[in-house]
Image: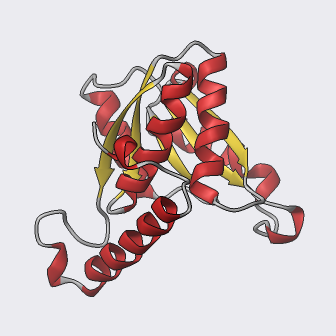
Amino acid sequence: MVLEGTQVVKKGVLNAGMKLLADGKAKGMVVVLHRRSKESQVFALEDRYTQLIMNELKNLGLEKEKVQVISAPIDGHPITLTEAQFVVNRLSQHGVRSAILVSEGFHTRRSFGVYSQEGARVGLHVVPYSYFIEYDDISWWHKAEGVGDFVTESLKLAYYLLHGYVSIKSLWY
């Protein structure tokens, strides 16, 4: 399973990943971090953050052998595509043929699109799994955060489609 990246890891994504492991739906966890240029890194955190994540996962009961942290270099645009290209390449090098992509809310469609598109190039089958933190997946339109995320992610998906970063056929499984 791949926990999609950001510069810091939210508890919600870790909880979703831990549940998939506990339910036997995944064998291991890859935590993706965005490694940005030195100028845009989080002060006093970047160099030690990977070890902090590993320590916390160990405290949660996850065996060291079942987790890997990947720092994906994210210096350019588009970020989601750049991450997917790096991570899929790394997974392919390790012989991984299928992965659950754990992504937040409405971002899942675009993430799944780029990961499945990149995965198809190397024979990696990607299955999307979304989690919600600020609102739930059933009544998201009752919360401002839900509506805002829906609109923002819809616009970003349209942008990716218009610029050819993702194809329409890669959005469906």
Q: Residue at x 54, y 35 (%)?
A: 118
Residue, far left:
138
Location of the N terminus by quadrant is top left
Q: Where is residue 89 shown, x and y percent of the image? A: 65, 29
Residue, far top:
95
Q: Is residue 58 above or below residue 79?
A: above
Q: Is residue 96 above or below residue 35?
A: above
Q: Is residue 22 left or right of residue 91?
A: left
Q: Is residue 64 left or right of residue 161?
A: right
Q: Where is residue 103 shown, x and y percent of the image? A: 40, 51
Q: Is residue 113 left or right of residue 96?
A: left
Q: Nearer the viewer, residue 99 or 166?
A: 166
The colour scheme of the drawn protein is secondary structure
Is residue 149 among the parts visible in the rendering? Answer: yes
Asked which quadrant contains residue 38, the reply is bottom right
Is residue 6 among the parts visible in the rendering? Answer: no
Q: Nearer the viewer, residue 158 or 67?
A: 158
Asked which quadrant contains residue 153, the reply is bottom left
Residue, far right:
38
Q: Nearer the viewer, residue 61 or 27?
A: 27
Location of the C terminus by quadrant is top left
Q: Residue at x 28, y 25 (%)?
A: 25
Please state the total of marks drawn on the protein image. Answer: 0
Q: Is residue 131 above or below residue 38?
A: above
Q: Residue at x 43, y 56 (%)?
A: 11
Q: Where is residue 46 shown, x and y percent of the image? A: 78, 57
Q: Is residue 31 above or below residue 1?
A: below
